[in-house]
């Protein structure tokens, strides 16, 4: 019997493991009955596999009642007057005569039929039809084939006295070929047959392998294989495929793939559902290279049919989630570029991320165009993905253009927006010259962030002096002033005092207040020291006053930490020497407590008094309130 295709509700529904709590009765529910002693299968060839029906004994009848104990759903017992009425469900007049495949057999109606006056021959024939696939490998359209077979077998044995023979067990094994089946059911059915002295048949073994392809169990499958070998049953094409899929779903992926390739070499052809099983399972466990190869083989075997299109949608989602570039492009080309499918927003974001990581500007722009066609507002994250794709593709000019577009769109740019550019310039310093050339080409239309990131990378790699030419042209290129982060990086990467002094003067004029951080305080130390080195007390006191009046950001640093800076003593000493009144707020802030800075300022004041023998001429005015310690 050829293997039916289990695709009415989707391939994965039939390939997923069923809950053991929904397994079949008696032999299918080990918690209800203790397992029987398993007889050893005789290792010899039988002349025939057909067994006569054994006589029914009270023990077997009782066992059969238990066998079907849990078959009837509780909902079927409601509103029925007798046990036999359980086999009928409410049905409309249109459904009453609607039979499967045009058959006139009333037992094949879509609704559960009456069985009160049904002959044994009719039930047996119906079971044969239910178990036999049509030309397409499908079983038909009878709802819940699993339950229908189960109910017919129960009625046949309990009410018609049909003997327990191989046919009954074949029917029950076929009923297990269902998502609600169980590998334990196979095992215990084989135990029951051994207990009833009923030899297995090829049909039963083939059905068992089908069950184990859906509900994999290595031990039970080996038992079935050993039975087939001991009885010299043929391992048909379908049986081999079921064994391979069972290995696959157990997690023996390499062994299953090896057997699959060996099977193709021997048989030359594989049924499509086997390809589909590999595709679903490889996608589930993340074997993406194997998934791509299996997709290519599946397409070569059949082309792009409806089932394959569904698999392509699934594959595109799996590939893009894992940022698998080759697989994403392959699936995208056959689903979106044709066009055939409109991906979801999540899939589009994943594809855009894949394109960004692998520098595929074409794919990235295709995603953006789809988003625009869907009237989706292009966000900052979308533009940053375009920037990353451009950088990975080696096109810094395109990356800078995207930064300008972001500014024109009113999006807030920060240092994170240029992180990929900065990383690329640091990893390959030769690209800094390319970046400078791209900035010159877009003179007047360049984003400030593009200039900033280029200058920061240049200062880190070549020193601040190399970036000063761009610094002087910054306003001309972008129409804006550099931010304090750039000043900080330039100050920390220069070795020339004149450059530090120039930056300090520009900084004091461009920025009036800011929140303090550890790196900012270090920059202030460098700037004030540079001003003292060039005897510019005006800028030095201006910067120092900001430190006294500015609070820390989120309590990151103590606002009194400036007291221990290197510039404090030289600035106070210089202010006292020239009798600059701007020094007294600093002296007042230092002359508190008994720490090192307090002792230092008291010592300077004492030396000044002794040297000049003058009176402290400090002038108290309202402007000093700004510098009082808070």
Image: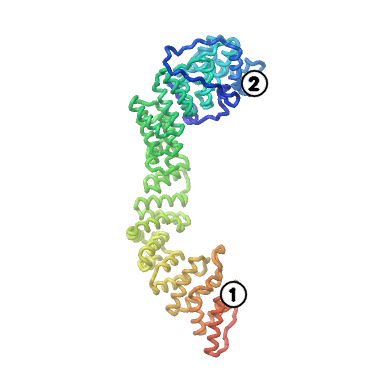
Residue 4 sits in which quadrant?
top left
Seen as rendered, the residue at the extreme bottom is 613
| Residue 628, disc | 1
Mark 2 lies on residue: 77
Q: CA distance from mark 1 to mark 2?
A: 88 Å
Could you tell me which residue is drawn at 47 percent across and 50 percent down?
379
Color scheme of the displayed model: rainbow
Residue 271 sits in which quadrant?
top left
Q: Is residue 85 above or below residue 559?
A: above
At label 2, counting other C-alpha atoms closer than 10 Å, the crowd grade (few under 14, some 14-19, many 20 or more) is: some
Position in image of residue 548 (x %, y %): 55, 72
Quadrant where the C terminus is found in the figure: bottom right
Nearest to N terminus: mark 1 or mark 2: 2
Could you tell me which residue is drawn at 56 percent across and 81 percent down?
602
Quadrant where the N terminus is found in the figure: top left
Element type where label 1 sits in the image = loop
Q: Nearer the viewer, mark 1 or mark 2?
A: 2
Position in image of residue 455 (x %, y %): 39, 63
């Amino acid at each position: 019997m050829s293997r039916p295709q289990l695709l009415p509700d989707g391939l994965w529904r039939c390939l997923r493991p069923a809950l053991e709590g929904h397994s079949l009765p008696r032999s299918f529910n080990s918690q209800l009955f203790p397992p029987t002693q398993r007889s050893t299968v005789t290792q010899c060839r039988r002349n025939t596999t057909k067994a006569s029906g054994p006589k029914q004994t009270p023990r077997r009848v009782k066992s059969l009642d238990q066998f079907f104990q849990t078959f009837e759903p509780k909902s079927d017992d409601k509103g029925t007057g007798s046990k036999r009425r359980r086999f009928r469900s409410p049905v409309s007049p249109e459904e009453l005569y609607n039979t499967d495949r045009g058959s006139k057999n009333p037992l094949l109606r879509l609704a559960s039929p009456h069985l009160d006056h049904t002959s044994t021959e009719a039930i047996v024939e119906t079971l044969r039809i239910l178990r036999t696939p049509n030309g397409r490998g499908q079983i038909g359209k009878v709802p819940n084939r699993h339950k229908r077979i189960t109910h017919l077998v129960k009625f046949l044995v309990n009410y018609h006295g049909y003997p327990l023979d191989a046919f009954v067990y074949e029917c029950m094994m076929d009923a297990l070929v269902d998502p609600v089946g169980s590998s334990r059911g196979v095992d215990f059915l084989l135990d029951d047959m051994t207990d009833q002295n009923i030899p297995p048949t090829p049909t039963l073994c083939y059905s068992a392998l089908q069950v184990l392809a859906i509900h994999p169990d290595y031990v039970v499958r080996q038992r079935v294989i050993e039975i087939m070998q001991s009885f010299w049953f043929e391992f048909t094409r379908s049986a081999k495929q079921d064994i391979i899929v069972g290995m696959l779903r157990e997690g023996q992926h390499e062994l299953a793939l090896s057997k699959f390739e060996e099977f193709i070499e021997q048989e030359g052809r594989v049924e499509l559902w086997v390809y589909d099983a590999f595709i679903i399972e490889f996608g589930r466990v993340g074997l993406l290279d194997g998934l791509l190869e299996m997709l290519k083989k599946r397409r070569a075997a059949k082309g792009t049919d409806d089932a394959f299109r569904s698999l392509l949608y699934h594959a595109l989602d799996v590939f893009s989630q894992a940022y698998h570039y080759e697989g994403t492009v392959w699936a995208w080309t056959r689903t979106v570029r044709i066009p055939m499918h409109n991906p979801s927003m999540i899939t589009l974001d994943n594809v855009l991320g894949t394109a960004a990581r692998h520098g595929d500007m074409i794919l990235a722009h295709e995603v953006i165009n789809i988003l625009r066609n869907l009237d989706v507002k292009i966000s900052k994250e979308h533009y940053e993905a375009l920037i990353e794709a451009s950088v990975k593709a080696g096109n810094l000019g395109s990356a800078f253009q995207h930064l300008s577009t972001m500014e024109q769109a009113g999006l807030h740019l920060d240092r994170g927006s240029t992180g990929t550019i900065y990383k690329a310039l640091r990893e390959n310093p030769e690209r800094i010259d390319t970046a400078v050339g791209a900035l010159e080409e877009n003179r007047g239309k360049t984003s400030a962030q593009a200039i900033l990131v280029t200058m920061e990378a240049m200062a880190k790699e070549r020193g601040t002096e190399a970036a000063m030419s761009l610094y002087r042209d910054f306003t001309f290129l972008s129409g804006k002033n550099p931010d304090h982060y750039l000043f900080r990086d330039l100050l920390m990467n220069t070795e020339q005092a004149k450059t530090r002094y120039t930056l300090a003067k520009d900084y004091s004029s461009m920025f009036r207040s800011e929140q303090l951080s550890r790196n900012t305080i270090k920059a202030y130390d460098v700037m004030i020291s540079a001003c003292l080195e060039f005897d510019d007390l005006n800028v030095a006191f201006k910067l120092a006053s900001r430190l006294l009046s500015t609070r820390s950001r989120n309590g990151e640093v103590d606002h009194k930490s400036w007291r221990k800076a290197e510039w404090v003593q030289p600035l106070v000493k210089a202010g006292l020497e020239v009798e600059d009144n701007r020094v007294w707020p600093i002296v007042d802030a230092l002359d508190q407590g008994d720490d090192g800075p307090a002792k230092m300022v008291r010592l300077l004041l004492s030396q000044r008094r002794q040297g000049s023998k003058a009176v402290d001429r400090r002038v108290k005015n309202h402007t000093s309130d700004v510098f009082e310690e808070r």
